């Protein structure tokens, strides 16, 4: 079983059962490895990064990540107060 399983009513990504099966196949309980592997597998199969990310982590999560990183980079560069 994955540690810190992603289980939330708002979560729309892959099911915990699916993620646990991937974890078992990979021989790990590290959720970061499992999630990264799932996204990479979809991208390697021709799925656009944004679609793969949202499929694995839930709808809208790619946009959330992009805007969070962008905001932090602007803040770190002194472009935002």
Image (cartoon, rainbow, N blue to C red):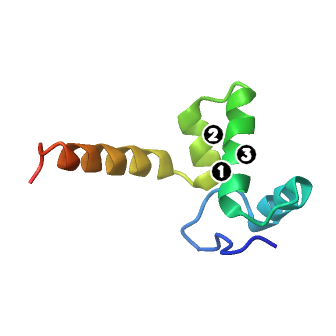
Q: In this figure, which residue is indicated by the disc labeled 2?
A: 52
Q: Quadrant of residue 42?
A: top right
Alpha-carbon distance for marks 2 and 3? 11 Å
Q: Which mark is residue 56?
A: 1
Residue appearing at x 35%, y 47% in the figure: 69
- Tell me which numbered mark, 2 or 3, is placed earlier along the sequence: 3
Provide the secondary structure element on which disc 3 rests: helix
Residue appearing at x 64%, y 73% in the figure: 7
Proximity of marks 1 and 2: CB atoms separated by less than 8 Å:
yes
Q: In this figure, which residue is indicated by the disc labeled 3?
A: 37
Q: Quadrant of residue 81?
A: bottom left
Residue 74, horizontal then vertical, whole percent = 21, 43
Q: Is residue 17 left or right of residue 40?
A: right
Alpha-carbon distance for marks 3 and 1? 10 Å
Residue furthest to the top: 46
Residue 33 or residue 45, whichever sits in front: 33
Residue 64, horizontal then vertical, whole percent = 40, 51
Residue appearing at x 68%, y 72% in the figure: 5
Nearer to us: label 3 or label 1: 3
Q: Quadrant of residue 22?
A: bottom right
Residue 63, horizontal then vertical, whole percent = 42, 45
Nearer to us: label 2 or label 3: 3
Q: Quadrant of the N terminus?
A: bottom right
């Amino acid at each position: 079983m994955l540690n810190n399983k992603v289980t939330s009513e708002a979560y729309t990504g892959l099911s915990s059962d699916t993620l646990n099966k991937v974890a078992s196949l990979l021989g790990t309980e590290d959720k970061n490895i499992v999630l990264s592997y799932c996204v990479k597998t979809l991208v390697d199969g021709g799925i656009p990064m944004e679609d793969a990310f949202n499929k694995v982590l839930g709808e809208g999560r790619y946009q959330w990540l992009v805007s969070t990183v962008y905001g932090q980079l602007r803040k770190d560069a002194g472009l935002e107060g």
